[in-house]
Image: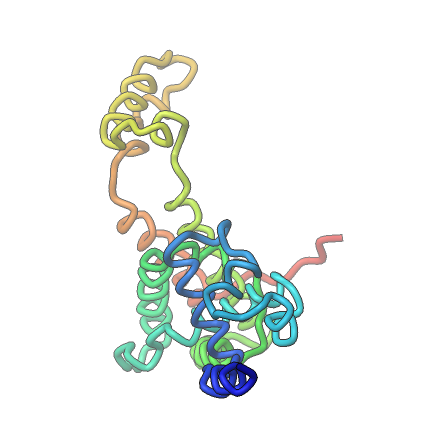
Amino acid sequence: MARQRNATRTNREPVTVERIANAAFELVEQDGLDALTMRKLADRLGIQAATLYWHVRDKHDLIDLLAEELFARFPLDDLPPDDNETESLYTFGQAFRHYLLERRDAARILSNRFVIGPHMLAILERLLGWLRAADLDERRSAQALIAIMAYIHGFVLWEITPMSGPVARGEPFPDYLADVRNELEQLSTSEFPHTVALAGYLTEQGNDERFSFGLRSLLNGMAQGAPEATDAS
């Protein structure tokens, strides 16, 4: 019996950080970030939870691994080359938004998370290179990078969050928007003239156009020259 156990242990695939990251990624894709636990991950890997803790200190470290895994899977090298830095940033923003939308809870995992890993650093270096080539100084390049990433992540989080109770409970989204538009148009035109006038635009479907407008506005503002930094204190 002892020989059998030793043979099984010898044939078992070793636990590595890469295996842990892949298994965690698959669990999140299947069940969502909230369902991810160290015990479930250990079960998926076929190991004891205590073994997992030799490689990952806690769930915070695990989510850092997930973040780096998401950066690793983003096809940065597939983006078309462009001599115009602003257009390169725009193309990246569009591609990264779609990437986050295609992967479950990706925006939640990556938002405000600074992971020092080779894949995250590759993206960071590329974006900072474009920003500096667009004649932004060092400080403004860093500020612009944070602004761009915050816009992309924030927009995606806004997109994937149910708009209101009726939608979360199953009401068709177009029907909900039609109801909201009707309510807005019934408001007093003397008290809310702008809201009533723009009710149709406020309740339009089409986040692609909204995202593009915001990203273009952000990048065009940077290209025209960012304002001087002010002391928030």
x, y percent for residue 188? 37, 11
* 193 to 69, vertically: above or below: above
The quarter holding residue 83 reads bottom left
Picture layout, residue 134 above or below residue 224:
below
Residue at 53% across, 86% down: 6
Which residue is at 50% across, 73% downward?
20
How far across and how far down the image is residue 142, in percent? Answer: 56, 71
At 37% from the left and 20% from the top, the residue drawn is 193
Disc tally is 0
Left or right for 81, reference 214: left
Q: Nearer the viewer, residue 83 or 183?
A: 183
Decide if residue 132 is in sight here. Answer: no
Furthest residue toward right: 233
Residue 4 falls left or right of residue 97? right
Q: Residue at x 57, y 61 (%)?
A: 38
Q: Which of 180 and 165 is in front in this view?
A: 165
Percent x, y of residue 42: 53, 65
- By what rule are the colours in the image chosen? rainbow
**Between 56 and 52, which is closer to the camera in this rendering?**
52
Q: Nearer the viewer, residue 78 or 225?
A: 78
Residue 32 seen: yes
Q: x, y percentage for residue 196?
A: 33, 21
Above or below 35: residue 223: below
Q: Quadrant of residue 107?
A: bottom left
